[in-house]
Amino acid sequence: MSIVGKSEIRVDAFDKATGRTKYYEDRMPQGALYVRIKHSEIAHGFVKSVDTSEAEKIKGVVKVLTCFDAPEIDFPTAGHPWSMDPEHQDVADRRLLNTHVRYWGDDVAVVIAEDEVAAMQGVRALKVEYEPLPFVLDVQKAMEPGAPVLHDNYPDNILKHTSVRKGNYAEAIKEPGLIKVEGWYDTPTVQHCHIENHGCFAYEENGRITVVSSTQIPHIVRRVVGQAIGRPWADIQIIKPYIGGGFGNKQDALYEPLCAWCCMQVGGRPVRIDCSREETFVSNRVRHAIRFHITSWIRPDDSMAARKVDLDSNQGAYASHGHSIVAKAMGSFPQLYPCDNMECDAYTVYTNIPAAGAMRGYGMPQASFANDSNIEECAHAVGMDPVEYRNKYIMPQGYFDGFSKNCNYYDSHRECLAKGKELIGYDEKVKEFAKDSGPIRRGIGCASFWYNTAVWPIALETSSNRMLLNLDGTVTMQCGETEIGQGADTAFAQMAAEAIGLKSYKDVHVVSCQDTDTTPTGLGAYASRQTYVAGFSIRQTAELLKQKIFAYANKLTRQSEHNMEIVDGVVVRKNDGKPLITLKELAMTAQYNPADSEHITAESTFTIKNNAYSFGCTFAEVEVDIPMCRVTVKNIVNVHDCGSLINPALAEAQVHGGMSMAIGYGMSEQLLFDQKTGRPLNNNLLDYKLSTVMDHPDLQAAFIENPEPTSEFGTKALGEPPACSGAPAIRNAIYNATGVALHKLPMNPHNLFAAFTEAGLIHDEWQEG
Amino acid sequence: MAQYKLVKFTLNGKEVEKMVDVRASLTDMLRNDYHLTSVKKGCEVGECGACNVLIDGEAFNSCIYLAVWADGKNIRTLESLQGPDGSLADIQQAFMEESAIQCGFCTPGFIMTAVEILETKKLYSRDELRKLLSGHLCRCTGYENILNAVEKTMKRRLGIPVE
């Protein structure tokens, strides 16, 4: 009876290996009209007029709609559950089309046409007259007095400011003999780069609007579409087919509201919006660039007396997920390396760059870079081995957080560090690399991270599930939690088969595609929550299903329903294991019994009032070619304590993907903007440097399986954590190789040249030598 | 405005012909006229490799290859690998077994380049395989298991033991 914990093949692997899996574009209705968007070509200003006359003359153009036609309804887009408390609702600062454009790429008008070419020609033929306004791209400049204001109700551009105060920082730093370790840590704007761009189509049926969308969060998108177009939420049906990755970008309402509205403007005919790669980079969402300033005060005995952390988060033009990201980043500081006296301040600030939203890690890749870079410098300052330093000061076993009620039940951090050390051959390599002194130097570095699995108690955590006993004894299951590539459906099938007592995970048919008309309400893929939260509703619904099965079996077998269990798809008498009836026989009899027919189903909702810590670390080994300002990652290992593994092979694959994203974040990725105009400079996959298979060493993933006590299946977060600690581990490896403490991502030759030059490492002797 | 031209070619082993818009890409034609859903659109400018197909045995990004150029060519998409009885090719099986598939969007393109590699019947080092596969972007897998799937299939076909 152990279906969980096995490396089963994904339930969707066959269809994906044959190319017949249907993504939104593969479900396109015949004759859907093409919607193309006219994006702003200034970073900030007002649209004075849009001349549509030339566009309307183009053959095939059906309708042109501009920002002057769009409803004046402000709506929020973040993929958060609705809050009944107005104070906790997301900021509604978005419109379908904008007269006040706030970034280069903002949405001004749309052309709806019978074919793609006409739609594109129509967009090109629009003449937009702007009144340009001054703009600001930098987070700190946006907070200065007199900076251009993006939203009138936020005159200082500060969307939100929150703080953490612990002990007395001001007093603590007066202690004599303290060593000050201070630095700026700057993280870039990056994009999710799922290989399938976001797209959707909408049509009307029976007076309601259906939107089929590449989204992670169908039920939340239904609410946002209703809000945006001013229709009751129940008037909207969202269908989520298979999607080609999301990574948080699709944890936002993107173009579904605009698509639904365009559909209404052409009498309910089907319309499609397909983002190009260039649009995906700029007019969807990006990761928050967060600038940190950290001051740590270390005692001569190497303990930390006090710490101050300032976090300035570049929100871009619209609130999207807003302050929640930097708030989570800030929340990690007092917990990961606890210190008695702390002062942290986080600001989320509007600027004229694309809107930042959720992205894998939700503030933690940024926080981990800043925190573990500074911790590495602290270790150097007191002359201690960086791993030993972490072992001494990282969150101890038994640590309890009063807010989330999370507990570090095991000694997760130290166990992960020990395993990582062993796997990368830390001790031997540190000794060996210390001998390097020429232009090529090797180094090894590590970084840890902090993560929460779910969002309770900040927001609602709920999971609903429906199970149906099929006539062949298998079970069909509908979950509110979505498959976005991570393998969720397979994990759910394994968990359900185990909970019910089926023979194999293949006996559970997971209805992969959510449809808000028929799927039990769920919140979708985010926060690395799904395996954890779905576990509760799967277990509960399986129990209900079993009760119904046992009740019917009692009628057929005379045996007590309390003396039954299901083993490999057979109802057996618990006391002696005697087989009573197969599920197939039971289901057939129940369905077709003329005297007592029953369609056996179960459905339930579980409200989760728990959360769980999920921890781990990265060890990286690098070779630095100093004169060439080039870093090669030679080895990299991630170790995770994500609790019990449901499917070890898929868990490992998930870690590989996160490590790859972390390497890109550390080494090459950055969305650049022209400082003079605010125009994005590299919003394509050629100029934006996503890692290829040549940019990685082999990726090694390892696990410490400490079962999470609050979880039905012992699991905790795994989706996002692998993306968190890779960049700082590489950064610390470079630091240990060269003595140069980098303070800016990505660590590409451009940034390395500046840092190495400042450190006096770039000189002619290399060439002579 | 649009001009149409008759394009005759071999598609997945079958002679086909259709009038196509001369402005259409091979991706458009394969998806829209022949309903081959394995041909994916990730960038439409030859950067990501999701639309990769084999043209006379050579891997091409079909998004930057005009449909009319297909005339007289032998074109194979991922759909060609599945046997008439629905059975899978060894490389498809390997992608499944090695957990090399996640969201599945880059998968068809990768597999078709793998087919090109495997058909050379040569033994490549892991680094050589990296270079040969580097025209494809994947955001889910970190490439690790994709590389394993291709390497193992290559070795199996060459009779080299794999662990």
Image (cartoon, rainbow, N blue to C red):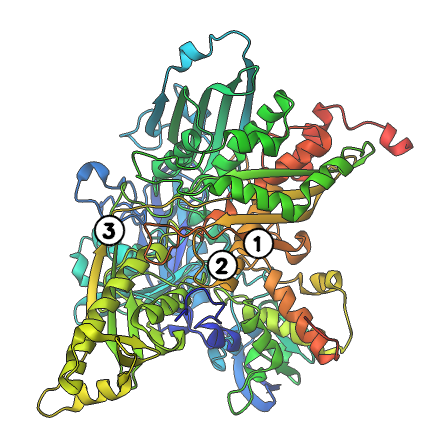
Vertical position of residue A427 compared to residue A683: above or below: above
Tell whether label 2 touches label 3 (CB within 8 Å).
Answer: no
Vertical position of residue A355 compared to residue A555: above or below: above
Tell which of A408 and B75 is nearer to you.
Answer: A408
Q: Quadrant of residue A161?
A: top left
Lateral position of residue B156 relative to residue A89, left or right: right
Tell which of B143 and A507 is nearer to you.
Answer: A507
Lateral position of residue A460 relative to residue A117, left or right: left
The reply to whether residue A519 is in sight is no
- CA gap between label 3 and label 1 equals 43 Å
Residue A713 x/y as whole percent: 36, 58
> Neighbour class for label 2 at 10 Å: few (<14), some, many (≥20)?
many
Tell whether label 1 touches label 3 (CB within 8 Å).
Answer: no
Q: Chain of mark 3?
A: A
Residue A508 x/y as whole percent: 34, 75
> Neighbour class for label 3 at 10 Å: few (<14), some, many (≥20)?
many
Element under label 1? strand
Q: Which residue is mark 3?
A: A228
Tell whether label 1 touches label 2 (CB within 8 Å).
Answer: yes
Query: Tag 1: residue type?
Result: Ala
Identify the residue at image location x=72%, y=75%.
B161
Residue A31 x/y as whole percent: 35, 74
Residue furthest to the front in view is: A576
Element under label 2? helix
* Residue A701 marker: 1
